[in-house]
Image (cartoon, grey):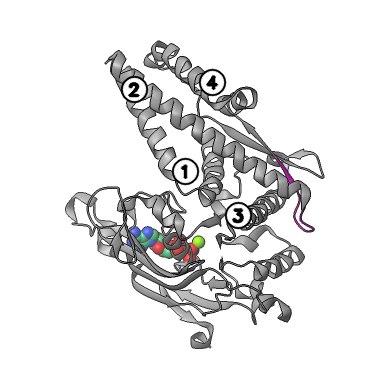
């Protein structure tokens, strides 16, 4: 694997990571090798590995790798954990900051919670940023976690989140688009269910829902066609190729008519559904779309594939995404691969590690068993974590 170390291009990624009051960490500084080789975090269950990946996931727009409430993140003391929340005054502040190597040089990204709201603050080179989407101008990240192991068998909402993350990695504004859509839909639903049938107000909200909903559906169609291109034209030699199909009212309409007409149809449909929704019914839109994946070679629905095959399908989708982003933006997303090795046979695992060495962006890997990463010993930076204390392998030895 020695040749893999010779990178044509400098990798993009995190040179230094700092966490403050973040989950199990009071304060942590990780200095990464300047070549930004893969980072391997090992340690027992509950040591603090995923928390580090989650911290990194807050350096890009969105709700982070666990979609957690911001109030759950600040470090809780053992005493606070055992007492009811109303009797302990919990710290509300937490922060993550990083020196990030981007295509335009090193930038300092910071995020965290400074007040009791569920809105995180963003700083870019010390300056407050207005929206989270600004982070996406500097860094993009994609993650695979054990929670996604049954993605194809689970609820459509997690699949939508996965797809939307891929869109966001391309277009940082997608996170704001989704939250504006959901907010307008919620307000519309509240008005109807509370019987406040103000036509002007409802129409304004329907306009917003239709506009944002169609933009979301169009962006999802776009990412699926980009991924399909790479999945078909450059199928991976190790991981099964996937056929991705979007299923959703708006996505289907976009197949047949221009976006402007889809907006009009969606607005009319929302208006016509007011009474139905007020009576507890549901309405379709960007919030009900789904996608399905077929294992191309086997012609088998991913939901019927084994857990290992499902993981392999997800990996092939993510590898296609890295190619699409490289082609389109000249920038590869960093990958956060939590417990990735769990369902892969050793041959595929080692071959995947070798592929990851060629990516022009930093890759973070976690696992409980360090021997799984033997083939990376000479090529990655290893940290061992024990009770929220992080040591290099040299320190452990
Ligand atoms: N807000 C918090 N304050 C303190 N500890 C937390 C908080 N949230 C999670 N933890 C703890 O952090 C520990 C490490 O979690 P995690 O990083 O998921 O472990 P793993 O190494 O298995 O990935 C767990 O014991 C978890 O209970
Ligand atoms: Mg974990």
Task: Say which residue label 2 marks.
Answer: 204
Q: Earlier in the sequence, mark 2 or mark 4?
A: 2
Tell me which label, 3 or 2, sits earlier in the chain. 2
Q: Regarding mark 3 in the picture, which secondary structure is present there?
A: helix
The image quadrant that residue 251 belongs to is: top right
Can you give x and y, in whole percent of width and height, for residue 379 in the image? Answer: 64, 79
Q: Position of residue 113 (x, y in %)?
A: 28, 56
Q: Residue at x 45, y 62 (%)?
A: 56
Which residue is under mark 1?
Answer: 174
- In the displayed structure, would residue 189 be above or below residue 137? above
Which residue is rendered at x = 52% and y = 52% of the image? 169
For residue 379, side relative to residue 269 (left or right): right
Q: Are marks 3 and 1 in contact (CB under 8 Å)?
A: no
Does 236 lie within the magenta span?
Answer: yes
Mark toward the start of the polypeptide (3 vs 4) = 4
Q: For this rendering, which residue is in front, 170 or 41?
A: 170
Q: Which residue is mark 3?
A: 325
Which label's residue is closer to the chain start, 3 or 1? Answer: 1
Location of residue 236 by image quarter: bottom right
Secondary element under disc 2, as helix, strand or loop, is helix
Q: Identify the image quadrant of the N terminus.
A: bottom right
- Prevailing SS of the magenta stretch: loop
Q: Secondary structure at mark 1?
A: helix
Do labels 4 and 1 touch, CB within 8 Å?
no
Per the image, the residue denoted by label 4 is 261
Between label 2 and label 4, give the one nearer the viewer.
4
- The residue sitting at 67% across, 46% down in the picture is 227
Structural crowding at the residue carrying mark 2, measured as other residues with C-alpha within 10 Å and reported as few (<14), some (14–19) or many (≥20) = few
Question: Do the residues bearing badges 2 and 4 touch, measured as CB atoms within 8 Å?
Answer: no
């Amino acid at each position: 694997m020695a040749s893999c170390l010779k990178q044509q291009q400098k990798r993009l990624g995190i040179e230094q990571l700092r966490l403050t009051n973040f989950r199990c960490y009071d304060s942590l500084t990780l200095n990464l090798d300047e070549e930004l080789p893969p980072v391997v975090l090992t340690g027992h269950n509950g040591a603090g590995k995923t928390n580090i990946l989650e911290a990194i996931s807050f350096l890009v727009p969105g709700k982070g790798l666990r979609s957690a409430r911001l109030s759950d993140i600040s470090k809780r003391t053992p005493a606070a954990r055992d007492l009811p929340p109303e009797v302990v005054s919990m710290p509300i502040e937490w922060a993550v900051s990083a020196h990030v190597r981007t295509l335009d040089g090193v930038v300092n990204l910071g995020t965290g919670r400074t007040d009791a709201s569920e809105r995180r603050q963003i700083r870019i080179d010390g300056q407050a940023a207005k929206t989270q989407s600004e982070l996406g101008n500097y860094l993009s990240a994609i993650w695979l976690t054990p929670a996604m192991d049954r993605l194809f068998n689970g609820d459509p909402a997690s699949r939508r989140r996965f797809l939307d993350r891929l869109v966001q990695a391309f277009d940082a504004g997608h996170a704001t688009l989704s939250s504006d859509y959901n907010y307008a839909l919620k307000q519309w639903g509240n008005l109807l269910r509370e019987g406040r049938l103000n036509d002007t107000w409802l129409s304004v909200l329907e306009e917003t829902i239709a506009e944002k909903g169609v933009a979301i559906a169009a962006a999802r169609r776009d990412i699926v066609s980009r991924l399909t291109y790479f999945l078909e034209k450059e199928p991976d030699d190790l991981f099964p190729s996937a056929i991705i199909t979007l299923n959703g009212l708006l996505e289907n309409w976009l197949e047949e008519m221009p976006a402007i007409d889809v907006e009009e149809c969606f607005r009319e449909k929302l208006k016509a559904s007011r009474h139905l929704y007020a009576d507890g019914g549901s309405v379709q839109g960007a919030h009900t779309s789904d996608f399905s994946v077929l294992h191309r070679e086997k012609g088998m629905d991913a939901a019927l594939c084994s857990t290992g095959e499902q993981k392999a399908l997800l990996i092939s989708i993510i590898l296609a995404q890295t190619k699409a982003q490289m082609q389109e933006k000249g920038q590869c997303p960093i990958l956060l691969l939590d417990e990735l090795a769990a369902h892969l046979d050793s041959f595929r695992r080692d071959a995947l590690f070798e592929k990851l060495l060629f990516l022009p962006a930093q890759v973070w890997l976690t696992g409980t068993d360090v021997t799984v990463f033997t083939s990376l010993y000479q090529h990655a930076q290893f940290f061992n974590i024990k009770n929220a204390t992080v040591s290099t392998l040299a320190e452990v030895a």
